[in-house]
């Protein structure tokens, strides 16, 4: 185990963004939205008694503009000014939670005017964004004197809708500090994936591999940006069970990402063999998914449409399946009829940023360009992003191949392809349940930058990494 694998590599400890990053973001917000607005941080949801709280993580729009998870705080903007309202330090809390920052401390650290929350005046005309939990929405509704629903980004109107559009405009293209934060999250996620490959062996539970991966994240001062998927049943797309015992012939699909304390996410998937060696059938499908992913990443260019990236992946997958004899017929025609979704039923990726699916709290207004709508076609219905790509955007590229019984045993779903689907050929790949390969990609002026490129991905590199971890 290297120094960095056991978590002692302090160079990966998160580096906070400078206070001026947030004042610059607030200035850009005020330029685009000069009217009054409120951004809530939100509240912790305790369990069985008020002090049984899990770590608090503020709402993402608040984090974007303030950079610190301050429970119960509100950022007020308008008229060229930004003021942060916070609950004053509680003298009692020192006993349980240690020293509390005073308002003056916060003012100095965050370089913003700070006032006690009781001085916040609010009225129904103030614009705001939907919080993610009901308690915060209720608190905000009382303050504003109007109903604010939680998680209702698709139904906004009036000033709230305008504010949401401004936030999308600001957050779609990452500034240098945001890109640096995502890179930090990716670097720690690399340790997690290497740690997972090293920990994998037959007859252990998936939970043991998950623990090895999350250990790297926790030991480097980060948290998970979503519930880790570490499974021998990759055909369950977002499988969050970890109780399975890994068999030597299984593949582990690990979709695990770190999040920095400022909230910036990585979202990365690798699929590796429990035995340390892909069987020839697993390798064949793995190489096909890798080829599909390479083509899709190449299509990530400024000016390109992300829907085309998705279609590039689907088209390449169908051609590969025709070459393997799993599908029969003309690849282009099969793709147009929706054959890709038999084995790859989700979108090829999504926006990545402060949230793993960035800004999906605002519904499709972030993922879909004005005038574009979700399609109901099998190929596109789970496509979460339909915009023309611009330098500064970060996206995931995550094609997969899955043998999903709920699809392949559904006679209605398969009916249009009964003649095309060669089940005898497909059955030869029965040791492949699900393979997904996911990287985080920054769109640049020249093309793209695969931020997670150094996480082993080519089958030979994955096998070598596992071999080295096992001592040769
Ligand atoms: N980890 C969730 C996703 O890949 O979208
Ligand atoms: Mn993922
Ligand atoms: Mn993803």
Image (cartoon, rainbow, N blue to C red):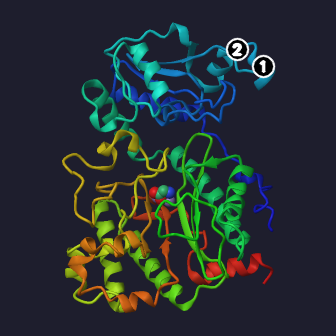
Q: Position of residue 404 (x, y in %)?
A: 41, 72
The residue at 37%/16% (across/down) is 79
Q: Classify 443 as above or below 357.
A: below
Q: Position of residue 435 (x, y in %)?
A: 49, 74
Q: Is residue 313 visible?
A: no
Callout 1 secondary element: helix
The residue at 76%/61% (across/down) is 4
Quick check: marks 1 and 2 in contact, CB under 8 Å? Answer: yes
Q: Quadrant of residue 340?
A: bottom left
Q: Which residue is mark 1?
A: 94
Q: Classify 404 as above or below 31.
A: below
- Most foreground residue, 20 or 37: 37
Q: Which mark is residue 437?
A: none
Mark 1 and mark 2: span between their CA atoms?
7 Å
Q: Position of residue 246 (x, y in %)?
A: 65, 73
- Most foreground residue, 111 or 239: 239
Q: Which residue is mark 2?
A: 90
The residue at 49%/66% (across/down) is 438
């Amino acid at each position: 185990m290297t120094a960095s694998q056991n978590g002692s590599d302090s160079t990966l400890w998160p580096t906070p963004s400078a206070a001026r990053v947030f004042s610059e973001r607030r200035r850009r917000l005020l330029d685009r939205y000069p009217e009054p607005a409120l951004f809530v941080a939100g509240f912790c949801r305790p369990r069985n008694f008020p002090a049984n709280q899990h770590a608090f993580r503020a709402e993402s729009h608040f984090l974007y503009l303030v950079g610190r998870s301050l429970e119960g705080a509100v950022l007020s903007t308008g008229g060229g000014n930004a003021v942060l309202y916070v609950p004053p330090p509680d003298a009692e809390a020192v006993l349980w939670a240690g020293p509390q920052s005073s308002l003056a401390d916060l003012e100095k650290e965050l370089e913003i005017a700070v006032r006690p929350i009781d001085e916040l005046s609010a009225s129904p005309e103030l614009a705001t964004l939907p919080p993610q939990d009901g308690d915060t929405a209720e608190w905000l509704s009382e303050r504003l004197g109007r109903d604010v629903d939680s998680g209702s980004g698709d139904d906004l109107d009036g000033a709230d809708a305008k504010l949401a559009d401004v936030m999308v405009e600001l957050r779609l293209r990452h500034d240098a500090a945001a890109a640096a934060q995502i890179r930090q999250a990716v670097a720690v996620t690399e340790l997690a994936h290497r740690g997972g490959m090293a920990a994998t062996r037959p007859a252990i539970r998936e939970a043991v591999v998950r623990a090895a991966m999350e250990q790297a994240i926790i030991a480097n001062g980060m948290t998970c940006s979503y519930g880790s998927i570490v499974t021998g049943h990759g055909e369950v797309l977002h499988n969050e069970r970890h109780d399975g015992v890994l068999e030597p012939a299984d593949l582990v699909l690990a979709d695990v990402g770190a999040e920095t304390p400022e909230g910036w996410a990585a979202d990365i998937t690798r699929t590796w063999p429990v035995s340390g060696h892909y069987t020839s059938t697993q390798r064949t499908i793995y190489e096909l998914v890798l080829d599909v992913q390479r083509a899709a990443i190449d299509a990530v260019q400024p000016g390109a449409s992300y829907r085309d990236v998705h279609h590039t992946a689907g088209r390449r997958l169908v051609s590969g399946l025709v070459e393997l004899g799993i599908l029969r017929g003309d690849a282009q025609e099969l793709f147009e009829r929706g054959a890709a979704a038999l084995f790859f039923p989700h979108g090829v990726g999504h926006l990545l940023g402060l949230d793993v699916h960035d800004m999906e709290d605002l519904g499709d207004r972030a993922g879909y360009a004005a005038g574009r709508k979700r399609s109901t076609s099998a190929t596109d219905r789970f496509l979460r992003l339909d915009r023309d790509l611009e330098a500064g955007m970060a996206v995931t590229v995550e094609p997969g191949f899955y043998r999903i019984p709920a699809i392949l045993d559904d006679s209605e779903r398969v009916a249009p392809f009964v003649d095309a689907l060669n089940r005898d050929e497909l059955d030869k790949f029965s040791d492949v349940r699900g393979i997904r390969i996911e990287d985080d990609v920054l769109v640049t002026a020249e093309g793209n930058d695969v931020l997670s490129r150094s996480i082993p991905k080519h089958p030979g590199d994955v096998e070598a990494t596992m071999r080295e971890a096992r001592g040769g």
